[in-house]
Amino acid sequence: MRMVDIIEKKRNGEELTTEEIRFFVQGYTKGEIPDYQVSALMMAIYFRDMSERERADLTMAMVESGDQIDLSKIEGIKVDKHSTGGVGDTTTLSLAAMVAACGVPVAKMSGRGLGHTGGTIDKLEAIEGFHVELSSDQFAKQVNEMKMAVIGQSGNLTPADKKLYALRDVTGTVPSIPLIASSIMSKKIAAGADAIVLDVKTGDGAFMKTLEESEALAHAMVKIGNNVGRKTMAIISDMSQPLGYAIGNALEVKEAIDTLKGEGPKDLEELCYTLGAQMVVLGGKAKTIEEARTMLEKVIQNGEALEVFKKFVAAQGGDPSVVDDPTKLPQAKYTIDVAAKETGYIQKMEADDIGIAAMLLGAGRATKESTIDLSVGLVLQKKVGDTVAIGDTLVTIHTNQLDIENVIQKLYTHIVISAEKVEAPELIKKVIT
Ligand code: URA
Ligand code: CA
């Protein structure tokens, strides 16, 4: 087999065989096929697309390029959730405890990552003593005992995806539906879940800015999952403004705990119920979405979800008393209120730039080497559609430095107040099964 023939075939709009797809993925991972040939192929795929069969084959070739996590020691149907990423998205922490309390095992592999705030693991490390260094036996044992554990990412998961993504990043071939969908799904499948629920974000703070693009990506991922034997569902949710109120690591942990107490922001709560209901159905613990939702509401009301979270924190070395007293989480030295300069309605809270403002305070990593400050971030006091009067607090800044004029300016620029009434955006745009 010759790589140049594969490139020409795709350039001409033909379908690649399973063997051809395996050949280039394996060859590239091993360093036997050079970057320039794979770049050409990525560009051909960008223009020519891939069939459903090719997408499934590409996904599985990437899965097979590295380690695959074996979750067979864990009882029950393992359901994983993946979000395509947003600002202030604390969903994982509360959602995991909620579905675990309904009896669905949550065996979560999480990352740190670059972004406006840290990833799930950084957030959890805001809890004194918490660690994610579990052996695979400890991991399985913990999930069997309390239905929930979080572990750090294995080093050799989908190496083909790592190499291909890095190459796409510098060759203008990231925004291709078949390439994005197979990249995301390969990581979820290698992480061992039996079933997958996807939260595809849409809007300013999302990877996909328009509803059409987000829908196309969601459909592509659901198809891949189901075609390779993992039951997959997706929702599309709004990311034109940040999710919930808190953006920042310790601040988001507090928000997740509030949500488990039934006192969280309405949008975050709604997202947890919507995603959670799908997970409980896929996990075989309820027959219908309605039944699953009722179960989830119950574990919030009777405190069982909060109890699962406490046990999970303690099992991984963390101080469970933060659940009763979140002031034990890292606190920033100063809080500064940003006051409205006009009266009217909140028209926009642009998620992406508000996320960058949180990052400038130190809540996120600009490069892999940056350290993050777990205590800092933003707490919104208003959301899109709310009324606002001059002098009302729009956002409270939690910071360890006082020289933050750039952050304040950014917030004023990207929080837009209008005289006309504005409707709050719909949170759940679509459910795709
Ligand atoms: N996120 C991924 O993991 N892969 C892509 O290709 C794009 C976004
Ligand atoms: Ca939030």
Image (spheres, rainbow, N blue to C red):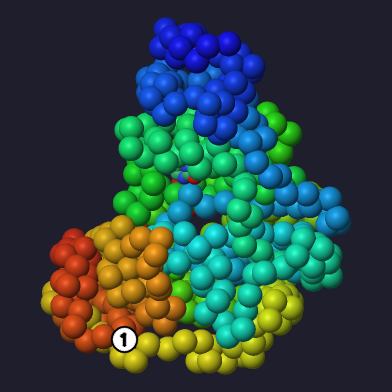
Q: Residue at x 58, y 11 (%)?
A: 1
Which amino acid does the dot numbered 1 rest on? Asn
Q: Is mark 1 within 8 Å of ligand 2?
A: no
Residue 54 location, x and y as percent? 58, 21
**Horizontal relation, residue 287 to residue 390: left or right:** right
Residue 378 location, x and y as percent? 34, 76
Spot the residue most to the left.
341
Residue 243 location, x and y as percent? 43, 64
Q: Residue at x 40, y 78 (%)?
A: 373
Q: Residue at x 45, y 39 (%)?
A: 165
Pick the quarter of the image with the C terminus. top right
Is residue 2 or residue 270 the one in the foreground? 2
Residue 26 location, x and y as percent? 60, 28
**Horizontal relation, residue 296 to residue 245: left or right:** right
For residue 87, which quarter of the picture? bottom left
Count numbered badges in the picture. Answer: 1
Q: Is residue 29 above or below residue 115?
A: above
Is residue 232 or residue 24 the one in the foreground? 24
Is residue 13 or residue 417 the one in the foreground? 13
Q: Is residue 110 visible?
A: yes
Q: Is residue 196 visible?
A: no
Could you tell me which secondary element the residue under label 1 belongs to?
loop
Q: Residue at x 73, y 49 (%)?
A: 69
**Horizontal relation, residue 361 to residue 40: left or right:** left
Q: Residues within 10 Å of mark 1 (few under 14, many from 20)?
A: some
The residue to which callout 1 is attached is 400
